[in-house]
Amino acid sequence: MRYRPTETKNGMSLLATSWAILILLIGGGIGWLFVVGEQPASERHKISAGITVKLPPPLLRIPPAIPPAVVTPESAAQEMPAPVTPEPEAPEVEAAMPEPLRPATDISLSPIPDPDLVEEGQKGPLPTIASDGRQPWQVYARPFDQTDARPRIAIVVNWLGLSDAATEGAIQDLPGTVTLAFAPYAENLLYWMRLSRVAGHEALLNLPMEPLNYPANDPGPQALLTSLSPARNLDRLEWTLSRVAGYVGVTNYMGSRFTTSAEALKPVLKVLKSRGLLFLDSRSSARSLVPQVADELALPWVANNRFLDNQASRIAIDRELEALEILAHRQGYAVGIAFPYPVTLERLAAWIPTLQKKGLVLAPVSALVGAKKPAKKPAKKPE
């Protein structure tokens, strides 16, 4: 059989066409790569926007293991707190009284009031002698070793309760053997009285009385006056005594005229005796009749010897304290009354620790009841 020329020609044409297409594809691919390689990345992203490339996942970098914490005494104590379980709300109660700062060797006195030593009066609770014979001046007294033969010194800080800062200073900065006297006009007297007993302080209540230069020098609206009837004075006395409970007795605030009148004084001291209280005569007058009238009534009493801060300066106060020491050595006891000036509290706090090496002992005022009577000399307190 003969091949036809037309068939040979067509076969050659197809083969040539195939090679031409292949060459064009290879050349076009090389040209495309050349063009793309010269373009910036942003242009390449535009060109390949329609191409999806499946990439392998990135390799994860695993950090090295964290070394265990070194336990020290401090870090060991810092444990995580345990979860807190809510508790039912407790009923409201009276806030606990802050505990005053005091020497570790000091003592706290019994809580007040003792229900057996209180009776209800028209103006409030009044001190009274218990049915078993116990008396407030003994029950509320700070304990003291009566066998101690050293000369005794009693310090009374007067007219407290009117200034919170001064009252807190006297309660917290002075030892419990210092006796505190509270003004009847002060607010929160029960709070102050309780706080002072927690700190070990025996307490008195100031009893305002008429001075010689009244009314120029006025001891207040509830002062006992020689111009009033005994009934009126006793009514005012009841108001003062009902202001608070827990004191061993009263001490006159001013009173240089009132304490020299037996007619005015005797009914007052008689009531104090019947209520089991003691009386500290501040001796604002050398002519005070308290010793005579109190002895007649068998009322427990003590007399002041010196006002320590008539001049509120360090030198003057130190001089009075030295005089008090001399007097205590001479007669076996001495009493000093001071006011809660900052300089006074500072000097007392510095002086009290020196007493032991001087052969003296600080005592509450109740420990001086029945001591030797003072010399007939005023306590040098100006009206």
Image (cartoon, rainbow, N blue to C red):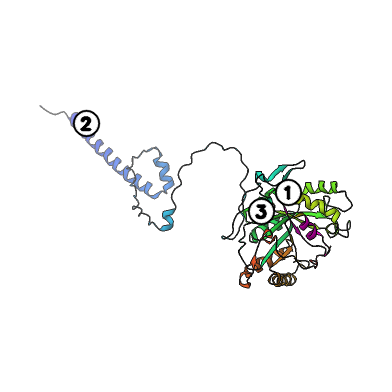
Quarter of the image where the N terminus is located: top left
Image depth: mark 2 or mark 3 in front:
3
Residue type at tag 3: Gln
Image depth: mark 2 or mark 1 in front:
1
Rounded to the nearest angstrom, the CA distance separating label 1 from label 3 is 12 Å
Structural crowding at the residue carrying mark 2, measured as other residues with C-alpha within 10 Å and reported as few (<14), some (14–19) or many (≥20): few
Is residue 74 found left or right of 351 in the rendered image?
left
Residue type at tag 2: Asn
Q: How many marks?
A: 3
Q: Earlier in the sequence, mark 2 or mark 1?
A: 2
Label 3 secondary element: helix
Farthest residue to the left: give it. 1
Q: Position of residue 263 (x, y in %)?
A: 86, 54
The one of 59 and 327 positioned closer to us in this rendering: 327
Residue type at tag 1: Arg
Please name the residue that numbered disc 1 is placed on: 275
Please name the residue that numbered disc 3 is placed on: 138
Q: Is residue 216 magenta?
A: no
Q: Is residue 186 visible?
A: no
Residue drawn at 35 percent across, 44 percent down: 32
Label 2 secondary element: helix
Quarter of the image where the C terminus is located: bottom right
Q: Earlier in the sequence, mark 1 or mark 3?
A: 3
Q: Position of residue 375 (x, y in %)?
A: 77, 68
Q: Position of residue 48 (x, y in %)?
A: 39, 41
Q: Earlier in the sequence, mark 2 or mark 3?
A: 2
Quadrant of the rendered structure where residue 327 is? bottom right
Is residue 156 found left or right of 57 in the rendered image?
right
Structural crowding at the residue carrying mark 1, measured as other residues with C-alpha within 10 Å and reported as few (<14), some (14–19) or many (≥20): many
Task: State the extent of the magenta-drawn residues as a range.
Answer: 277-296
Please name the residue that numbered disc 2 is placed on: 10
